[in-house]
Image (cartoon, rainbow, N blue to C red):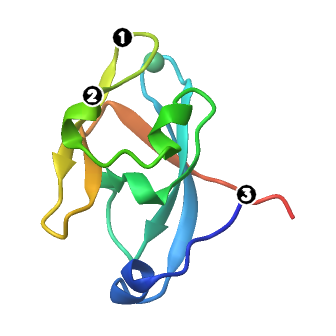
Amino acid sequence: MKIKKDKYLRERGGTTKIIKVSCMKCNSPIFIYQKDGPGWLKRCYLNRIIESENYPHLINNIKDISNLHNLKCKCGNIIGYPIRHKDGRLAFSLIRGKFKRSPYKVKK
Ligand SMILES: [Zn+2]
């Protein structure tokens, strides 16, 4: 697992943390996410998803928003929907109360 250090990180002040996003309803892990900068998690950029056991296709660099579907847990809970951010990056807009975040310990 590798933290991405790029212009997006620098623009957010250079601080980052790794969090685990999971389903509020059934507790299944959704993905491991690199959160840059401070603040609440409102959207998840695809280029910040570090690892996803259940949604490996998300990491394969989807370019077209029509190839991106609602982020849905296997239990049926819809966690987010696809958006294109103003900087051009594809992301999921997350629905508050549908997911939970927890700190993720990076194994060294
Ligand atoms: Zn679920």
Residue farthest toward the front in the current orientation of the protein: 63
Image-quarter location of ligand 1 = top left
Question: In this rendering, does residue 42 appear at all?
Answer: no
Please tell me how crowded label 2 is: few (under 14), some (14-19), or many (20+) other residues with Cα within 10 Å. Answer: few
Q: Report helix, strand or loop for mark 1.
A: loop
Nearest to the eye among marks 2 and 1: give it: 2
C-alpha separation, residue under disc 3 versus residue under disc 2:
29 Å
Q: Which mark is residue 69?
A: 2
Q: Which residue is mark 3?
A: 105
Sequence-earlier tag: 3 or 2: 2
Q: Which mark is residue 76?
A: 1
Q: Position of residue 105 (x, y in %)?
A: 73, 57
Question: In this rendering, does residue 87 appear at all?
Answer: yes
Taking the spot 45% from the left edge, 39% from the top edge, the residue there is 58
Q: Report helix, strand or loop for mark 3.
A: loop
Q: Position of residue 89 (x, y in %)?
A: 26, 61
Q: Name the quadrant containing residue 76.
A: top left
**Is the CB of mark 3 within 8 Å of ligand 1?**
no
Mark 2: amino acid: His
Nearest to the eye among marks 1 and 3: give it: 1
Residue 36 versus residue 25 in the image, above or below = below
Q: Position of residue 103 (x, y in %)?
A: 60, 55
Taking the spot 52% from the left edge, 30% from the top edge, the residue there is 55
Residue farthest toward the right in the current orientation of the protein: 108
**Is the CB of mark 1 within 8 Å of ligand 1?**
yes
C-alpha separation, residue under disc 2 versus residue under disc 1:
13 Å
Q: Nearer the viewer, residue 90 or 103?
A: 90
